[in-house]
Amino acid sequence: MTTTRAVHARSLVDPDAFWAEQARRIDWQTPCEQVLDYSRPPFARWFVGGRTNLCHNAVDRHLAKRAEQPALVHVSTETDQRRSYSYRELHAEVNRMAAVLLALGVRQGDRVLIYMPMIPEAVFAMLACTRIGAVHSVVFGGFASVSLAARIDDARPRVVVSADAGSRGGKVVPYKPLLDEALRLAQNPPEKVLLVDRGLAPMERTPGRDEDYLAWRERVGGTQVPCEWLESSAPSYILYTSGTTGKPKGVQRDTGGYAVALATSMEYIFCGKPGDTMFCTSDIGWVVGHSYIVYGPLLAGMTTVLYEGTPVRPDAGILWQLVEQYRVNVMFSAPTAIRVLKKQDPAWLTRYDLSSLRMLFLAGEPLDEPTASWIQSAIGKPVVDNYWQTETGWPIIALQHGIEALPAKLGSPGLPVYGYDVRIVDEQTGAECAPGQKGVVAIEGPLPPGCMSTVWGDDERFVKTYWSGFPDRQRYSTFDWGVRDEDGYLFILGRTDDVLNVAGHRLGTREIEESIASHPAVAEVAVVGIADPLKGQVALAVCILRDAGRAATPQDRMALEGEIMQTVDRQLGAVARPSRVVFVGALPKTRSGKLLRRAIQAVAEGRDPGDLTTIEDPSALAQFREALQG
Ligand code: PRX
């Protein structure tokens, strides 16, 4: 019998043989000459010389055997619409979208920015890009103009694909005004904007720039657009993610390595078979959506469910109703969604037939023990926690039920996944930590196939940010704390940097601080993440005002707090809005001027702030405590 540990060991001892075998899961127009080129660490090139295409493998390849099987099922409880596309229909729609993009001047290597709600056209656009070798950059629809403009300027897309509006919790969220504002702010706006009009919100159109997708779709008719065979390491997409600086990083993904890694994970981790149905509740704007709404299930010949809506509308049974209706076999969600359900009537969980469901996968933030055991006993299915990042594109730590059914340990995502040489190391020395000893979760190079190849347009930033954190040698840092137990199970203990995780959304404190600092009343601001029972973390903003008089009365403070929240909503989007804004006369800092984030966090969470010997002004913390209570 194969064991998880044996597969893992083999993948590290003989990566060439291991990955050459996995590469057979996908179609190659030209097979590779070399499995791995690691001559220029930390840049790894997988399947060198091989030529393939993600869209071919996700769509065209299945036409022979499963043309009439549903490929994409769209459910919107926001607009009350359901649409299903077979592989044959998906192929036709992707061809049309590809033909439109070509007609608008998009060529191989060009970027296309996709700013879309959860509608089928968003998936068509992603697949159309990979079909013609264009590089897509999907920006989460919950982000607003300033975030969007920063991404436009970094990716420099030839075309932006967008829509009139999204909808959340029954409320229409117009996208076009946010996009127009972003295009006004951008230094390098694209020539063309392709718009899907859902009829949800009026759109102002700029003649010569804004194009109507439906009109174009008619015009291109049934044009067939061949797949562009790309060298394995050609970029497939850029996905921006937050770090410590205000400038988002474009995580660049390759083509062949990603296809192989996802196809392998579908079997070994997610136990998904061709013909199965997968329902992933994430958003296409996040990495989980890229990998497990779009590419992973389609590469595996599965049916994927694209859901626009929340877990509690029209009622708290909706997710399970969809499981019953579409006979979902594999479900993927986030701990936050489950914590939301925990507050509802538990009867919703037993109302529907869940017999098709094999497992529930959860990722994106720490899965607390009470939530894990609650959902596991409520639905009577194994719950599989898995730990990874935008940077890696697929799980780093998980139990791999497709290899071996190992028991879970509550609070742990499990064991290192094949391909990842995971180490827990001492931050100061780089030495490996003993079991039970906390350290940084690091990965020895090379990263396996499918992980980020570089930071878009900035190789140096890739090396400096991710590979220079330890004094002894070059090693990838996840920026997470972790600990290993005697059995090799890993536990994740939170970020080592200033990245927030709000309801599974990864946000940079710097970006939020910059947005708040743009409010004319604010002189200085610190944003910290504090523990929240529902969202995991929420952002708390601590501000010093230019004129303290502006926050003299409780009414003043409330009004200003509202204004500041609106500023963040308008610039970054409601996802980044701090849950509270408090006003102080001084921020707790060290004598050298470094913000004491941990102390602010501790006080806000009602914990002991710890060692304060370096604090410049001890009264600052007392002031902060008072402001919190006020
Ligand atoms: O801090 C870890 C946390 O989310 C970060 C990555 O977020 P993102 O780039 O949005 O990718 C999410 C992909 C699932 C990690 O650095 N994180 C993610 N999964 C877990 C987790 N923390 C604890 N347990 C997890 N299962």
Image (spheres, rainbow, N blue to C red):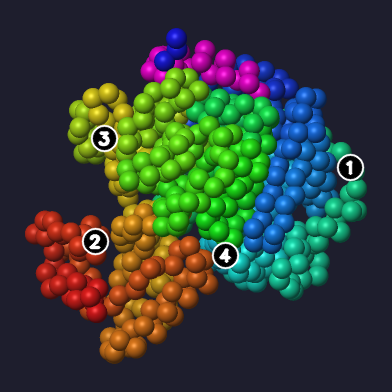
Q: CA distance from mark 3 to mark 1?
A: 55 Å
Q: Mark 3: which secondary structure?
A: strand
Circle nearer the N terminus (3, 1): 1
Left or right of residue 115: residue 83: right
Front residue (pair 574, 309): 309
Answer whether residue 25 is magenta in the image. yes
Front residue (pair 89, 233): 89
Answer whether residue 8 is magenta in the image. yes
Amino acid type shown at disc 3: Val
Q: Which residues are magenta?
A: 4-26
Circle nearer the N terminus (2, 1): 1
The residue beneath circle 1 is 223
Q: CA distance from mark 3 to mark 4?
A: 39 Å
The residue beneath circle 3 is 483
Task: Tell me residue 393's x, y (percent).
Answer: 51, 38
Q: CA distance from mark 3 to mark 2?
A: 23 Å
Circle nearer the N terminus (2, 4): 4
Circle nearer the N terminus (3, 4): 4
**Other-residue count near label 2 (Cα within 10 Å), few / some / many at <14 / 14–19 / ≥20:** some
Q: Mark 4: which secondary structure?
A: loop
Residue 491 vertical placement versus 11 (above, below): below
Q: Mark 1: which secondary structure?
A: loop
Q: Quadrant of ligand 1?
A: top left
Q: Nearer the viewer, mark 1 or mark 4?
A: 4
What's the mark number on residue 169?
4
Q: CA distance from mark 2 to mark 4?
A: 29 Å
Q: Nearer the viewer, mark 3 or mark 1?
A: 3
Amino acid type shown at disc 1: Thr
Task: Tell me residue 162's x, y (percent).
Answer: 69, 59
Residue at position x 43%, y 43% from top?
A: 378
Left or right of residue 344: residue 523: left
The residue beneath circle 2 is 605
